[in-house]
Structures are given as structure tokens and as C-alpha cells.
Image (cartoon, rainbow, N blue to C red):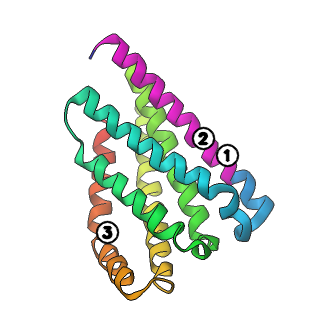
Amino acid sequence: MKAIGVKYLHFFYAMSAILWACVVVRGLLLLPLVGLRFFPGGVADFYLSIAIGNIVIENINHVIFCRKLNYILVLELIGRLFIGLGVILNYPTIAKNAAFPTLVLSQGIIELFRYSYTSYKLKFRIPKSFNYLYLAVILVGYSVKTLSEMVLMFLSLGYADDRFGTFIKIVLLVYIPSAYMFFKHSYARRG
């Protein structure tokens, strides 16, 4: 890859890490101040714009620099769109559950570590201790994130009509195998 490409990717991953750090800090500040009831009003739009916008730009970068589409990133984008637009924004009352702040904070910490790790890896050699820390964050974070997404989908079943409710049930059935696939991809990404 050309030097300008490495510089751009380093900048992109560093800025993504900073944005996700902002999501985590905002969530950690607002949760004790406003509680579960008003937490979605202060974080939801910011979180969803970072979560969806960041993965869209990462998909575009992958196509530009690798000259092919990364299907895992496309599936991740579809999943984030479904959770964000199909579940959280469609049924905002479920975001007042404790699963929403758990989702925001777990995904924020995962993405903060992932983008920091990738940005650092482009310029320097990764120490073994950071490899183990990154693996621990992925292992715990993806489990918590998956569980909170499943809770939010389950809660949305009470508000969804029959057709969309059936679709959510189908998504819940395939969620565990797909979550394992995303976990394996994230684990392999560290190498």
C-alpha cells in the first residue's frame, strides 16, 4: 500500500477511536446524571450516527484500498442498521431499558479498542500485553453486546406488528451463529 494510503488509514482509525471514546465518555457521564429514563435522549442519535457512519466509511475504505467488498463489514452494517433504525428508533420506549446503555457502552469500548489497536498496528509493532488485553475486551465485550442487542430485539416484539415481529423472531434465531462469526472475524483481525 502506498504511503499516503497508510497515512490516511492511520488517520481514519485514530479519528474513529476518538469518536468512539467520545461515545463511551458521553455514556458514562450521562448515565449517572440523567438515569435510564432520559439516557436515550442524550446518547441515541450520537451513538447511532457514529455506529452507522463509521462502518459505512470503513466499507468504502475497504473497497478503495483492497479493491473488493468485505462481506463481514457489509453484514455488520446491515446488523447495525437493523438494531439502530429497525429496533431502537422504531420503538424508542425500549431504549429506556438497561440493555440500551449496556449496548452503547460495550460497543463503544469494543470499537475504541479495535480502532486504537488497528491505528497503532499501522505504525508500530503491537506488544503482546496489548494483544491479550484486546482479546479480553473482544471476548467479554462481544458477549455483552450480543446479549444486550438480543434483549432489545426481544423487548421490541411487544411493540412490533405481526409481520415485523416474525422477522425479528427469525433474526433472533440466527443471531447466535452470526454473532459467533463476527467474534471469529474480530479475533482474526488482531493477528
Whichever of callouts 3 and 2 sits on the residue coming sooner in the sequence is 2
Camera-side residue: 171 or 179?
Answer: 171
Which residue occupies the extreme right position in the image?
Answer: 33
How far apart are labels 3 and 2 at the CA level? Answer: 27 Å
Question: 36 above or below 53?
Answer: below
Question: 54 above or below 123?
Answer: below
Residue 5 part of the magenta-drawn span: yes
Numbered disc 1: secondary structure: helix
Is mark 1 in CB contact (under 8 Å) with mark 2? Answer: yes
Is mark 3 in CB contact (under 8 Å) with mark 2? Answer: no
Circle 1 is placed at which residue position?
25
Chain part drawn in magenta: 2-27
Label 1 neighbour load within 10 Å: few <14, some 14-19, many 20+:
some
Q: How many marks?
A: 3
Is mark 1 in CB contact (under 8 Å) with mark 3? Answer: no
Q: Position of residue 104 (x, y in %)?
A: 56, 57
Circle 2 is placed at which residue position?
21
Tell me the quadrant of the picture where the C terminus can be found: top left
Residue located 31% across and 47% down the image: 73
Q: Amino acid at mark 1?
A: Val
Circle 3 is placed at which residue position?
176
Which residue occupies the extreme top position in the image?
Answer: 3
What numbered label is drawn on residue 185?
Answer: none
Q: Position of residue 169 (x, y in %)?
A: 34, 81
Q: Is residue 3 left or right of residue 111?
A: left
Is residue 124 something one can see in this rendering?
Answer: no
Camera-side residue: 46 or 21?
Answer: 46
